[in-house]
Image: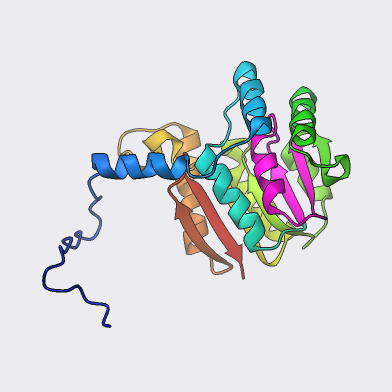
Amino acid sequence: MSGFPAPTDKVTPRQPRGQERVITANRQTSWAFSDAYVAEDEALHWARDRAREAGLRSVAPGTGAALRLLAATVDAKAVAEIGTGCGVSGVHLLHGMRPDGVLTTVDQEPEHQQSARQAFRTAGFAANRARFIPGRALDVLPRLADSGYDLVFCDGDRLEYQDYLAESLRLLRPGGLVAFEGVFASGRTVDSGPQPTEVLRLRELVRTVRESQELVSSLLPVGDGLLCAVKR
């Protein structure tokens, strides 16, 4: 069979270059369905509750499901996470990693990491599956091994994302993957109006990753935007 539509098929007109496609109610419903596609367990609900109480943002369920998939796709044994929070993203990553994999997670707030420890334990992961390092990411990352990681997930200070990218390229093995959470900035990244420095930095990141000869990238429309790239 050819790849062309049959005469009776409805053909969607091609969008003019540079023009955004209209977001219809059907597309919003589809995104909502996608976000709820992977059911979350009690450990994740517990971690989300702790994050809410602490005033922290957690990755959306759809983003968590994507992180599981990405970790499984690269057969991740060593993952570095910037921004432990209360463990929501970590639980998803651990579910996608190899059974002998270790998650190294960095956060400036040790009390948040304590909540994450409990979430990992509740999810059934042994204590040796995660290594918790308290501290500022840009102080900790230089101490981690070159080419020692299969995946780096960045969910820390948006103003430091460009620096995280540079560190990630050093940390990742060839074929490893880096992912950045929240690059849509609640729609502000594509808004033409004046924006704060954080949004301008996100735009720079998206452009840098897209134009890099070292990376094969994609921007996934899950949660608040997940920018992913594989190191060549």
Point out the image quarter for the C terminus: bottom right
Up-down: is 222 above or below 59?
below
Instruction: Return the x and y of residue 147 as percentages of the image width and height.
Output: 77, 63
Q: Is residue 111 left or right of residue 229?
A: right
Q: Is residue 96 left or right of residue 10?
A: right
In the rendered image, residue 87 lying in the magenta stretch gets the answer yes
Furthest-bottom residue in view? 1
- Nearest the camera: 68 or 106? 68
Instruction: Return the x and y of residue 191 as percentages of the image width and height.
Output: 33, 38
Instruction: Return the x and y of residue 90 as percentages of the image width and height.
Output: 69, 41
- Nearest the camera: 67 or 225? 67
Quarter holding residue 214: bottom right
Up-down: is 128 above or below 176?
above
- Nearest the camera: 113 or 5? 5
The segment highlighted magenta reads 78-106
Q: Is residue 190 left or right of residue 89?
A: left
Instruction: Return the x and y of residue 227 as percentages of the image width and height.
Output: 51, 51
In the rendered image, residue 118 lying in the magenta stretch gets the answer no
Residue at the (60%, 49%) spot, across then down:
67
Point out the image quarter for the N terminus: bottom left
Up-down: is 91 above or below 213?
above
Quarter holding residue 195: top left
Residue at the (57%, 37%) spot, across then down:
159
Residue at the (32%, 40%) spot, across then down:
28
